Structure formats: structure tokens, C-alpha cells
């Protein structure tokens, strides 16, 4: 199992960014997937979940601003980040849903910095 | 929202020592609890799921226990490679993490 995030960078407040997570080593279409973030030196915060059938759930802090999606043909998970705020600055990880609702594999993470 | 309170926030222990980290949920989470290890500069890795089940490839010196609102992670015979931060996580109602425990060598 390998998960590789990309698309991070420095962005101004109020702007948008789209993160990608390329998956390999498993049947991507059969698994739910998550995004989790970690502000510098801080703990972990769950961001969003998409089921294998593309049902979605969001944390209150990002609801209405972020959109999780997937392209099973490309084995890729996405996170569209809109109306970014300084408090969205974090490392963003994608992770696979395990047999239960825990996260069994994580990517290496991608940094998003929101600053003017 | 379910709140997860983890203690201690930091811990210093000697090689070979047994270490215990506690996690308390704000309501019953029915053993829907996982523990993750995050080494410096790396992403988290699953250690324990369903409160007491060892993830694949995790050394047997790690163990989890608990029920209801109280859970713990025990590391027997501490090794140098166990220096890391540890996070508990509930998945009974959405997903929330404890604040983390930073484990260092004494």
C-alpha cells in the first residue's frame, strides 16, 4: 500500500488549492479514504471522509469550504480547499479506512501554508 | 462531539522500562479506539485498533486495553526506536484524536 500526496504550497488567505493523493498497492475503489491535518507542532485533526460509494462527511471547521472527491479510474483522492484561512496551515495527510473505521495506512503528508 | 483526553502530554523513560499512556473519552466509545505512533518527521502509523488488537507488523511489546471511556497503551521493555509521539483516536462517532504523548528517553 502506498499513498502519495501532492499539490501543497504557499497560498494567500481567501484563495484556493487542490490536493491530490495517488494510491497504489490495493484496490482503491473498494476503500473509504480520509484527509487528516496536523498544524505545525500540534496534534491531529480529522478533516473529511469519502466512502467507496462516494458518500462524504466533513469536520465542522471545513464544512462548506473544502470538498473531498475521488477518481477511481485514476486511483486518486482529492481535497479542494477554498476560502483558505491562516488556521488551515498544516500538513495534510491522506489515509485509508481500515476494516473498521480506523486509519490503517497514511501518506507522507503535504504542507499547506496560508499566509499573505 | 466526543472529546479525547490523553495523559501524560510528555513522558521520559529509560530503556527496558514499561510505559503506560492513558486516554479518556467524554462518553462511552465501545472500544472503537485506535493508537497511532508518529516518529519525528514521519506520518502516523497504526499500532492498535479496536482498543486491544495489534496492527500487522507491530511488535508484541505494544498492547492496548480498556473499555467504556478509559483506555491505555502499554509499551513493555522500551526500545530506542519507540521514541515518538503517540495519539489515541476514537471512531465511534466520527473521528477525534487525543492531544498526544511525546515519549523521550531518560
Image (tube, grey):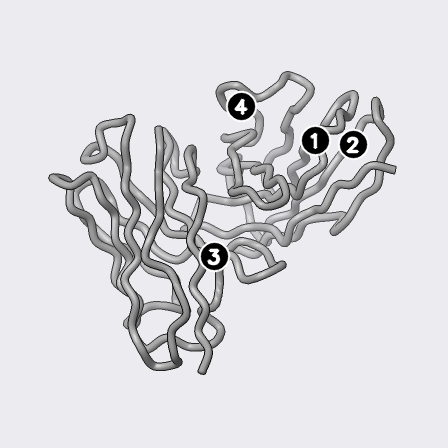
- Give above or below for A83 relative to A61: below
**Badge 4 element:** strand
Label 4 close to label 2 by CB (< 8 Å): no
- In this figure, which residue is indicated by the disc labeled 1? B82
- The residues bearing labels 3 and 4 have C-alpha atoms spaced at a distance of 28 Å
Label 2 close to label 1 by CB (< 8 Å): yes
Q: Specify few, some or many for label 1: CA neighbours under 10 Å numbering under 14, 14-19, or 20 or more.
A: some
- In this figure, which residue is indicated by the disc labeled 2? B19
**Badge 2 element:** strand
Chain for numbered disc 1: B
Residue B8 at what x, y percent from top left?
A: 76, 48
Mark nearest the camera among 2 and 3 is: 3
Chain for numbered disc 2: B
Residue B28, image quadrant: top right
Residue B48 at what x, y percent from top left?
A: 55, 29
Q: Residue at left 63%, top 44%?
A: B40
A27 vs A86, left or right, is left
Q: Sequence order check: which comes first, mark 4 or mark 2?
A: 2
Mark nearest the camera among 3 and 4 is: 3
- In this figure, which residue is indicated by the disc labeled 3? A91
- Give above or below for B26 relative to B67: below
Mark nearest the camera among 1 and 4 is: 1
Amino acid at each position: 500500500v502506498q499513498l502519495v500526496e501532492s499539490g501543497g504550497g504557499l497560498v494567500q488567505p481567501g484563495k484556493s488549492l487542490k490536493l491530490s493523493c495517488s494510491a497504489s498497492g490495493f484496490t482503491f475503489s473498494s476503500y473509504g479514504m480520509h484527509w487528516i491535518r496536523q498544524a505545525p507542532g500540534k496534534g491531529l485533526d480529522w478533516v473529511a471522509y469519502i466512502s467507496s460509494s462516494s458518500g462524504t462527511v466533513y469536520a465542522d471547521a471545513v464544512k462548506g469550504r473544502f470538498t473531498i472527491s475521488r477518481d477511481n479510474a485514476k486511483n486518486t483522492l482529492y481535497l479542494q480547499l477554498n476560502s483558505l484561512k491562516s488556521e488551515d496551515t498544516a500538513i495534510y495527510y491522506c489515509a485509508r479506512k481500515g476494516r473498521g473505521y480506523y486509519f490503517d495506512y497514511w501518506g507522507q503528508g503535504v504542507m499547506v501554508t496560508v499566509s499573505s | 462531539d466526543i472529546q479525547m483526553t490523553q495523559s501524560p502530554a510528555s513522558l521520559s523513560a529509560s530503556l527496558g522500562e514499561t510505559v503506560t499512556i492513558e486516554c479518556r473519552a467524554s462518553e462511552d466509545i465501545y472500544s472503537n479506539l485506535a493508537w497511532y505512533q508518529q516518529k519525528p518527521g514521519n506520518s502516523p502509523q497504526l499500532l492498535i485498533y479496536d482498543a486491544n488488537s495489534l496492527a500487522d507488523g507491530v511488535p508484541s511489546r505494544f498492547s492496548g486495553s480498556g473499555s467504556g471511556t478509559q483506555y491505555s497503551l502499554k509499551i513493555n521493555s522500551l526500545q530506542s526506536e519507540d521514541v515518538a509521539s503517540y495519539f489515541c483516536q476514537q471512531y465511534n462517532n466520527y473521528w477525534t484524536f487525543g492531544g498526544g504523548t511525546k515519549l523521550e528517553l531518560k
